[in-house]
Image (tube, helix red, strand yellow):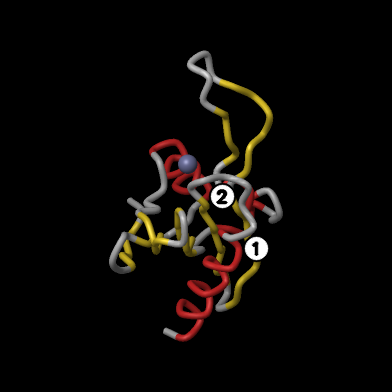
């Protein structure tokens, strides 16, 4: 599907805006077009172990939308680190939010390909 291929390219470009070592880029497809994009970023807090707390790309993308309009949407998410494609399956917390908002599908990068899953 053409829109999905386009969204993958947009997700890659968006990931490269991230200020983190693992760069994630998320794109929301709704009604046959890209309606929002987001990347992960440092939010200034630190965990007790010193790790930096970050806002996930999915959440950054969702923040730019009218959330009632997300039912049936597809999330496309890509990750890379040092220029290499990485696994970008949404974490349990983001999956929970995507499900609550009615997203139907997620398309995510793995180190060697893209995978598509229905959100149940
Ligand atoms: Zn997440």
Vertical placement of residue 48 versus 87, above or below: above
Q: In this view, does 76 lie to the left or right of 119?
A: right
Residue that badge 1 annotates: 36
Q: Which mark is residue 8?
A: none
Quadrant showing the N terminus: bottom left
* Residue 105 appears in the picture as rendered: no
* Residue 39 appears in the picture as rendered: yes
Residue 83 appears at what percent x and percent y?
Answer: 46, 62
Residue drawn at x 64%, y 24% is: 45
Q: Local crowd at mark 2 within 10 Å, few (<14), some, or many (≥20)?
A: many
Look at the numbered disc 2 and give the secondary structure of its residue: helix
Quarter of the image holding residue 32?
bottom right
Does the beta carbon at disc 2 come under 8 Å from ligand 1?
A: yes
Q: Which mark is residue 57?
A: 2
Q: Sequence-wise, which precedes: disc 2 or disc 1?
A: 1
Q: Residue furthest front?
A: 82
Residue sitting nearer the eye, 12 or 117: 12
Residue drawn at x 67%, y 34% is: 43
Residue sitting nearer the eye, 44 or 6: 44
């Amino acid at each position: 599907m053409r829109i999905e291929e386009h969204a993958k390219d947009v997700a890659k470009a968006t990931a490269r805006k991230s200020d983190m070592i693992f760069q994630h880029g998320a794109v929301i497809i709704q009604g046959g077009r890209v309606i929002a994009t987001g990347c992960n970023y440092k939010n200034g807090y630190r965990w007790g172990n010193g790790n930096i707390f970050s806002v996930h790309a999915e959440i950054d993308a969702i923040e730019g939308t009218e959330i009632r309009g997300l039912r049936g949407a597809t999330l496309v998410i890509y990750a890379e680190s040092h220029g290499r494609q990485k696994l970008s399956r949404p974490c349990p917390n983001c999956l929970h939010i995507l499900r609550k908002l009615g997203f139907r599908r997620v398309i995510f990068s793995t180190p060697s390909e893209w995978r598509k899953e229905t959100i149940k």
